[in-house]
Image (cartoon, rainbow, N blue to C red):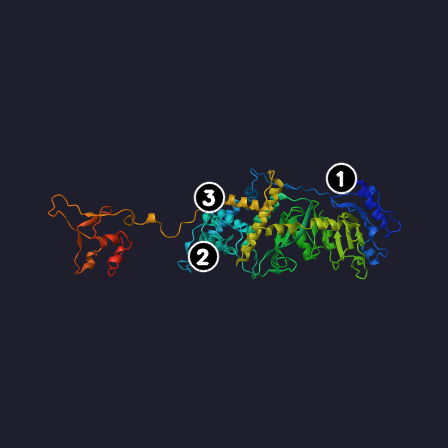
Amino acid sequence: MAAAFDSDWDSDEDDNIENIFNENSDSEPDFEGFGPEDIVRNGAVIAHIDMDDFSPENDDEDNSDKAEGWTKSSGPPLCAPFTGESKLNVNMENQEPIDFFQLFLNDDFLNIVVQQTNLYADRKKNQGRQGNHSRISKWKPVSLEEIKVFFGLVIAMGLVHKSDIDTYWATEDVIFTPFFGDKMSKDRFQNILSNLHLCDNDTFIPPGQPGYDPLHKIRPMIQQTLNAFIDVYSPAENLSFDEATCPWKGRLRFKVYNPAKPCKFGIKLYQVCEADSGYCVGYDVYVGKNNRATSVYCEELGLDEELSETTKTVIGLLARCGCLDKGHRVYLDNYYNSPELFDELEHMNTYACGTLRTNRKGVPVAIKRKNRKLLQGQCIFRQKDNLLVIKFHDKRDVHMLSNFHEPQVAVLNKTDPKTNTPITKPTCVVDYIKHMGGVDLSDQLNNYNSILRKTKKWWRKLFFHLVNVCIVNAYQLYKKFSPDVKKKSHFDFRLSTVRSLVEAGGVAARPAKRGRKVLGELPARLVGQHLPEYVPATPGAKRARPLRECKACNVKKKDRERTKRKQTSFQCNTCQVALCVPDCFKAFHTYVNYRQVLLPAANEDSD
């Protein structure tokens, strides 16, 4: 091996590793250990060693494996170079958090949400089944500005977690959060949430008929996000392919159960993510066997119909994401891996690595044998063209399959505390551990400040799950391409997005003030200073103290019957209304409904 050292690598450590392997090199009689020229330091890996040196002595080749082309001869695989480039494919005038968020959920898509929400609410309101005090009876059309405020509040609910939506508008001092009530009333928010819609229900095709789409309710969101994920950003060389889960425990035909996931019940999504960042390049929602979208891409590629469903799923989604014929290296787990899949990917200049189930068709007999026990650190491998299958024993047997790795073992920059010797693992195992976690990283970020809440509609749960994915993707692009010297944290990125959405919807209707009328809104006769005075005499009047009918204690003429009218010579100096003193004067300036106090039998309305 060619020598390559880092400047901070001490030659004393080289001598230490050489001595250790010289002392423990009894697996092969002709193995003489390592010199400094054999040690290559690559991050946590300080050397690569041929796997033959870690094979057991009784590793004989099987005749059936030879007939299939599997041999112990090792050689470098012939792989096409990676021709892609990790880059942003759009020009951005500004690079604030809201600008990255709008790369995925722009105004054009939000206008579709506004249109379909108003259409659904109008139809629901016109059905006439609701009462006068129902929420839908108060519906008013939503605008683009208002829907931005709505989404801003939804994201903010992930930052300020409360158990129930109503508590965000609670006024008790312990849990009071005035931000939500200042931007939108509780009734208006719940009205928009209950009528939120993405498509026209009249275009739905029932099950069993040609063109039936089980994801019809959320199809616009799927199309928007898939196109944006692919068009906005080109991923790096290493990708990970795995399952993600949108939590859901309600009734649903394609709900799945996976005990290995934190959310055991839910909607399964096949995801392709960039290995280093967790950026979701594409996904496919599992709705049962014979996925329509996967079948279309497999037919375009001319794949054999007899291929397994897992092979079609992987190739179909990679084709949908535009990740074939570019030299990408995809890491998968044992649910998908098989020699059949790797052969098909190699024909498309795409390479893969991952764990393997030994019951897959095409696995060599030497790897399948269960009666051959390996000691810790020992390996068995077989190679056919670029395909490499290994069986490695650590704490238990680990089976790996790759079509771009050499049969080598990596010496790690770590030591076993029991034996004080460097830890060794096959190179494909080290790379798999390093690059397989892209989907798990995306899921992990989705769970931070998640906007998911309980709902009775499965498609609404999946919709907000995809909004979460959009936020995480936007955050990853912000970290990669923002010119800010000090990048915002994930929490601050969401907070900045909330502020921008609320400010963009600044002209949206603010909640109306509710509650009792304040003092200034009372009639003028109940406020201020009021004093009695004589009713002034008109010029030429016969009486010096003229009389006028009392405003408070006189009933209407039609209701008087034989009742005498009551007159007084006093009036209010401010209101200029004739009033008997003192009872009528006091009641008129004290009570809103003064007639009910003075004339309870008459039960007249106040003026």
Task: Using a 10 Å C-alpha cutoff, classify the residue at mark 2 as few (fewer than 14 neighbours), some (14 to 19) or many (20 or more).
Answer: some
Residue at horizontal 84%, vertical 58%? 63
* Residue 31 drawn at (x, y percent): 87, 48
Which mark is drawn over residue 332? none
| Marks 2 and 3, how far apart at CA | 28 Å
The residue identified by callout 3 is 506
| Marks 1 and 2, how far apart at CA | 71 Å
Please indicate, yes or no, whether residue 11 appears anywhere in the rendered image: yes
The residue identified by callout 1 is 8
| Marks 3 and 1, how far apart at CA | 56 Å
Instruction: Kindly state the secondary structure of the residue where label 1 is placed.
Output: loop
Task: Using a 10 Å C-alpha cutoff, classify the residue at mark 3 as few (fewer than 14 neighbours), some (14 to 19) or many (20 or more).
Answer: some
> 311 or 60, which is in the foreground?
60
Instruction: Kindly state the secondary structure of the residue where label 3 is placed.
Output: loop
Q: Nearer the viewer, mark 2 or mark 3?
A: 3
Q: Quick check: 412 left or right of 167?
A: right
- Upstream in the sequence, badge 2 or badge 3? 2
* Residue 469 drawn at (x, y percent): 59, 49
Q: Split into 4 quadrants, where in the image is the N terminus?
A: top right
Residue at horizontal 66%, vertical 49%? 438
| Residue kind at label 3, given as amino acid type | Gly
Q: Is residue 509 above or below residue 594?
A: above
| Residue kind at label 2, given as amino acid type | Lys
| Residue kind at label 1, given as amino acid type | Asp
Please indicate, yes or no, whether residue 75 appears anywhere in the rendered image: no
* Residue 448 drawn at (x, y percent): 59, 51
- Upstream in the sequence, badge 3 or badge 1? 1
Q: Nearer the viewer, mark 3 or mark 1?
A: 1
Q: Quick check: 388 left or right of 305?
A: right
